[in-house]
Image (cartoon, helix red, strand yellow):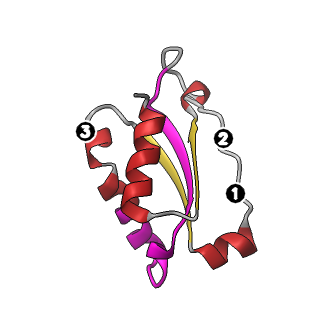
Amino acid sequence: MSVKQIITEKLTAALSPVYLEVINESDNHHVPPNSETHFKVIIASEAFEGQRLIGRHRSVNQALTEEFANGLHALSMHTFTPSEWQAEADVPNSPKCRG
């Protein structure tokens, strides 16, 4: 199973998102072809209601603890409540790696 699939499954199980997009951005970085080390997650979940941004990020990180221990290097997170997602729905593009 790919890292993208694992991330999708674990975040779905942990946070029951109303919207989830997992994007492999490894090709934007200096890593071997077909790497799965850098991802962007866009997630809207009722679990984020009443949480500050740091709490939302901790929830995502906690769900993916094993992946970080096994080679997931970077995760860009855009976390929303369902109402924020409906109002905001604009996520910035990730910059290209400068390294």
Tell me the mark number nearer the camera, choosing from 2 and 3: 3
Distance between the Cα atoms at labels 1 and 3? 27 Å
Queried whether the magenta region covers residue 48, the answer comes back as: yes
13 relative position to 65: left or right: right
Quadrant where the image shows the C terminus: top right
Mark 1: which amino acid? Val
Residues at badges 1 and 3 in contact (C-beta under 8 Å)?
A: no
Q: Is residue 96 left or right of residue 57?
A: right
Would you name the residue on which mark 2 appears?
Answer: 95
Mark 3 burial class by Cα count in 10 Å: few <14, some 14-19, many 20+: few
Q: Residue at x 49, y 81 (%)?
A: 49
Q: Of marks 2 and 3, which one's residue comes earlier in the chain?
A: 3
* Residue 54 percent across, percent down from the top left: 41, 70
Pointer 1: what residue? 91
Disc 2 marks a residue whose amino acid type is Pro
* Residue beneath the point at 27% across and 33% down: 70
Q: Is residue 91 above or below residue 75?
A: below
Image location (x, y in percent) of residue 81: 57, 74
Q: Is residue 52 above or below residue 71?
A: below
The magenta stretch is: 35-59
Q: Name the secondary structure under disc 1.
A: loop
**Dividing the picture into quarters, in which one does residue 7 lie?**
top left
Residue hosting label 3: 69
Residue 1 shown left or right of residue 79 in the figure: left
> Which of these two is toward me, 89 or 30?
89
* Amino acid of disc 3: Ala
The CA distance from mark 1 to mark 2 is: 12 Å
